[in-house]
Image (cartoon, rainbow, N blue to C red):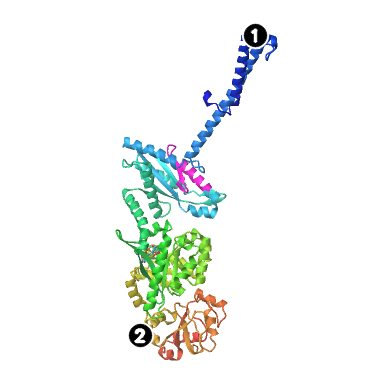
Amino acid sequence: MSWTSIDRRDWHLWLVAFLLIFVLGVGLLSFMFPAAFWERGGLVQAPDRAFYGFSLLLILTLTYLFQKESKLRELKRQQWEARLVHNAFHDPLTDLPNRLLFLDRLGLCVSRAKRNPDYLFAVLYMDLDRFKMINDSMGHALGDQLLVEVGRRLQTSLRDTDTVSRLGGDEFAVLMDDIRHASDVSRAVERVRDQFLLPLNLAGREVFTTASIGVALSSPGYHSAEELLRDADTAMYRAKAAGEGRHEVFDKSMHEQAVRLLKIETDLRRAIDRKELRLHYQPIMSLHTGLLAGFEALVRWQHPDLGLLSPAEFIPVAEQSQLIIAVTQAVLHEACSQARTWRSQFPPDLRFSISVNVPAKYLTKPDLVQEISALIAEYDLPPEYLRLEMTESGIMEDPESASQALARLSELGVKTYIDDFGTGYSSLGYLANLPVHALKIERDFVSRLDVDERNSMIVRSIVALAHNLGLKVIAEGVETPHQLDYLKALKCQFGQGYLFSPARDSEMATKFLEEWSGIGDVNKVILANLRAFELFQGLDEGLLGEVAKICKEVTVPAGEVVIRQDQVGDTVYLMLEGSAAIYRGEGDPSHLLTVLQAPTVFGEMAILNQGHLRSANVKALSDLRLLAIPIPQLDPLLRGFPRLRENLQNLVAGRLLG
Ligand code: C2E
Ligand code: MG
Ligand code: MG
């Protein structure tokens, strides 16, 4: 320590200095003016050797002690400084090197690789899958524990010379220094993935997690650490998009892809204003009647430079930002506007629905229900025309607010579907309580029905589950007649897929609607409906045509469940859009409702249980469509079919078909 570095806190050094100067000063004075000191009896009464000796000893002892304490303090200060430096370069939670230190070490490797082309290294960029869900559901303290444990496992699975770093959040990076061959990296990736096979024990609970890993290998083309980290990150995104627990090695095409993504993100902001988003409509068919039930609106982007882009190319990009909200709103408006056009173009009894895909971010919007109700009011659309599709994982991002939103949408009369059912992680117990209307079976299960037995088991289970929960089922990806037969046998109500039609622009969709909704051709609708009833199965087409001629469609308006007296009588009533038969012959229309309450009837009818029979005001119930067949006219037609006649008699007698 130099004198110049002494500060005020070193008061003991000042004391030593003062004592030294004092003793030396007094000694000097006593030698210079001995008479004055000795005779007058000044400050020092007895200047002898003992006095000086004692003073010097005292000074030396003090100096020694003070020096020692000062050294100790210096040591502490150095340690504190070292700690500060450590903290600046390490992550406080896991104590792993942070991004700054990682980039620094990576930078050294990049410069070394430039000098020595044989020198190889690699960067692994890792992101935990579903960390947010674990963190939200188990609490942040356990989320922290998980990160610490992951960091520890990474360190044990790699060499001492590798740098494991936590970049932030649930992202980790590994710098594999001085590798001999690229295959060393794949082995390291395997070792890292093996670490995730074992469950993590968090406060007594076993949790499984996986990581998506992106790998970037060194090459002389790299000029900075940031470039390498960026490419490893890009590869990680690619891995994540392919599914959980995967890894990808960066290649040049990915860089081009990343640039393209950036362009898409930038351009998408303008695309909405410039009306470059287009909707295509894919039919959803009723498997009972073979007629059109509705359309799914699927967005495409007519990009000025890149051409027509599929949603897979820009929806995931939009989902990473708030941009997805604007995209969803644009799609909703366009879909409702198309629905209005169709309603004005065709007779009023045309029934169809348009379903729109809504992402998690939109679903959890606090003013979602107001927005939807303003939307349908703007386009003068009865709520049952609009349907919203959301994925299980979308719902699970914020289950609490999603389920509230679903309940309020259902009150509004807007039905909701769970999309891509079977691919998420939601618990069945949770799903059973969600107020949704239908499940859409993920297209992969359906289109690969013929490929492997597992898929048919999954499809069968989903249909059974939906039926037990009182939900409807829509099978996506129906591609072959064989798949269609299988689904019909399971009593799956709706189907969508290339077998019927791919998604088409609005002009083609309008043609499809004209052809398949049976609009303007009552006979066609009735025929299709008759075919759907078990009762008439086995009847040849000619005879069915005759029966169709005497049938009449009756609509019982929503909000007022009363069958007029003149509609009752010697008539069989069959409920449309379903296989359940409903009946009542004689006077009191309440009998009709008795049958409506039967469990074979659709879930929505259960609402009738709660309402008063004659004046039940059932908002959510769309108009009841019944097929009325007068028995006296039917009877002569069915002379050759005693079994059928008997069944009809049973119906009239008030018994349901088995
Ligand atoms: P999704 O909602 O499951 O839509 C069904 C996708 O399956 C559509 O692809 C459709 O063309 C395709 N598909 C239909 N039938 C078949 C078939 O028989 N076989 C096969 N292999 N595929 C079939 P698309 O239009 O490319 O849409 C892909 C995904 O993009 C959609 O999956 C949906 O998740 C998303 N998406 C589409 N439009 C929108 C939108 O407006 N908003 C949001 N948020 N997402 C959208
Ligand atoms: Mg969908
Ligand atoms: Mg789907």
- Tell me which corner region of the image, top left, top right, bottom left or bottom right, holds residue 184: top left
**Could you tell which of marks 1 and 2 lies nearer the N-terminus?**
1
Q: Residues within 10 Å of mark 1 (few under 14, many from 20)?
A: few
Mark 2 residue element: helix
Disc 1 to disc 2, how far (Cα)? 149 Å
Task: Say whether residue 164 is magenta.
Answer: yes
The residue closer to the viewer here, 248 or 294, is 294
Report x, y in % for residue 306: 30, 58
Report x, y in % for residue 375: 44, 70
For the point 41% across and 38% down, the residue is: 105
Q: Which residue is mark 1?
A: 34
Magenta-colored span? 144-171
Q: Quadrant of ligand 1?
A: bottom left
- Left or right of 182, for residue 206: right
The residue closer to the viewer here, 126 or 478, is 126
Task: Say whether residue 99 is magenta.
Answer: no
Mark 1 residue element: helix
* Dot 2 amino acid type: Gly
Report x, y in % for residue 393: 46, 60
The residue closer to the viewer here, 531 or 213, is 213
* Dot 1 amino acid type: Pro
Q: Which residue is mark 2?
A: 542
